Amino acid sequence: MSVSRIILAAGFCTITASAALADYQLTILHTNDFHSRFEPISKYDSGCSAKRNEKGKCFGGSARLATAIAAARKHSNNTILVDGGDQFQGTLFYTYYKGKLAAEMMNRFGYDAMTVGNHEFDDGPEVLRGFMDNVKFPVLMSNADVSGEPLLAGKLAKSTIIERGGEKLGLIGLTPQDTDELSSPGKNIIFTDPSAAVQGEVDKLAAKGVNKIIVLSHSGYNVDKKVAASTKGVDVIVGGHTNTYLSNKSKRAEGPYPTMVGSTAIVSAYAYGKFLGELNITFDDKGNITSATGEPIIMDAKVEENEAVKQRIAAAAVPLEKIRKKVVATALAPINGNSKDCRVKECEMGNLVADAMLDRVKNQGVTISIANSGGLRASIDKGDVTMGEILTVLPFQNTLSTFQVTGATLVAALENGVSQVEDVKGRFPQVAGLKFTWDPSVAPNKGRIKQVLVFEDGKWNEIKATKLYSVVSNNYVRGGGDGYKMFVNAQHVYDFGPDLADVLAEYMASTGGYKPYTDGRIIRK
């Protein structure tokens, strides 16, 4: 679809054209990567207590989204509300309710459609099908053949047509092409190229007279840009998967809102319900975009919580206390997680968490794990270990992140890790599959790391500067947290693995009784 010209000005993007005979205006409200954050979250995307929420320190939560959605709808004659996938996974709400609470809330808010995210397959097609049976809107996925999966065949559509303000809107779904590697869809689903899938659906919709096409994409910002560049007829892509924050106001944004690729407007609203995306589109009578403006709305304390929704979520949280009290493992001795130890040297809790992370992904060829000590918040007593204790140790709802970096980058990461030991900072690295020696007498970031060994082929070898190593950490560290900015541009990145607390609980349970230890993997000269 053509446009007359694109103007980039004043930090945001607007498309203009000569006046059309019958302009049609549409507001697209959107969310993505909500990950069961029904309760408010902190600025770090972790849990936020009721007390802090009352003080205005929290963000998001279903109660704020309810208010913001209702307010945004009053601003426009024609609105749709859509989601870019990954409603599932991330908190105990999902562990307990699976997709039922998400379905309830999305129905309550009046969503018009969503695409399938990879985490919608975390518990197989069965849970996804149960969710789909409970929602009152279409769930879409174009780039997959589900004909061989009985639970989804004939149920999971590639695209749909809805009407708003007397106009037909074509909606198309996308999911990651590598979902079979990222989640558990089973062997009956074949995932395919996103661009070809989208073009196929665009052509079908155009044949039915639909000239306003919106793709709901859980494929990531870069893939969205490729799809926009390699297809014809797509007007808007509502993104997800990479938790991309687009904005015309914030320096932390990865791009403008919307990001224009040709005549296609791409939008994304970060994650976890921290923002509600609001894109205002004007089409001419031929279906060409003549204006595209907007900005994600932050769900901070200025957004009043809907009291009815707040009470519903509070009621839904009551059974979670049972999970928090559930015994998940046994500790044969106290496990030291004291920050005064873990932030300056190898510690028992650091070894446990690093070992657990590495054990979870070792079958993917990952050989090294790095955990920031600031993420370890408590010790564990001898005896029964409850999920509540696990969550006290790891309260931040971080996910496993896998990636590849060179040996030189790993050494730089370790230099960062030991650069603030004097101040007992949380960047100190706890590791597995790796040993290092460091010298505190050297100035920070000036060569404190004296030796690094990696475990390969059954023995310890000197790290090689130019060799690529597969690493696991948490999404906070991989994203540059605690000074680990050298990981931001890592290769083959996947930041959205299982919750770290679940990984730790399952690892401890698998031991039959965990015995804490240190083994000299970190040596101070």
Image: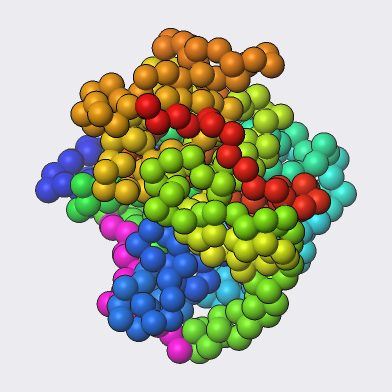
x, y percentage for residue 519?
A: 59, 34
Relative to residue 498, is residue 73 depicted above or below?
below
> Is residue 399 in view?
yes
Relative to residue 105, is residue 489 depicted above or below?
above
Q: How many marks?
A: 0
Image point (54%, 31%), residue name: 520
Which one is in front, 452 or 304? Answer: 452
x, y percentage for residue 498?
A: 62, 48
Which one is in front, 465 or 310? Answer: 465
455 relative position to 485: left or right: right
Image point (60%, 54%), residue name: 335
Which one is in front, 390 or 516? Answer: 516
Where is the N terminus found, in terms of image quarters?
A: top left
392 relative position to 345: left or right: right
Relative to residue 304, is residue 471 depicted above or below?
above
Image point (69%, 16%), residue name: 458
Q: Going by the picture, which residue comes out furthest to the left?
A: 10
Q: Which residues are magenta?
A: 294-307
User: Image quadrant of residue 428?
Assistant: top left
Say whether residue 236 is magenta.
Answer: no
x, y percentage for residue 447?
A: 28, 21
Image point (32%, 59%), residue name: 296
Which one is in front, 458 or 10? Answer: 458
Say whether residue 304 is magenta.
Answer: yes
> Is residue 259 in view?
no
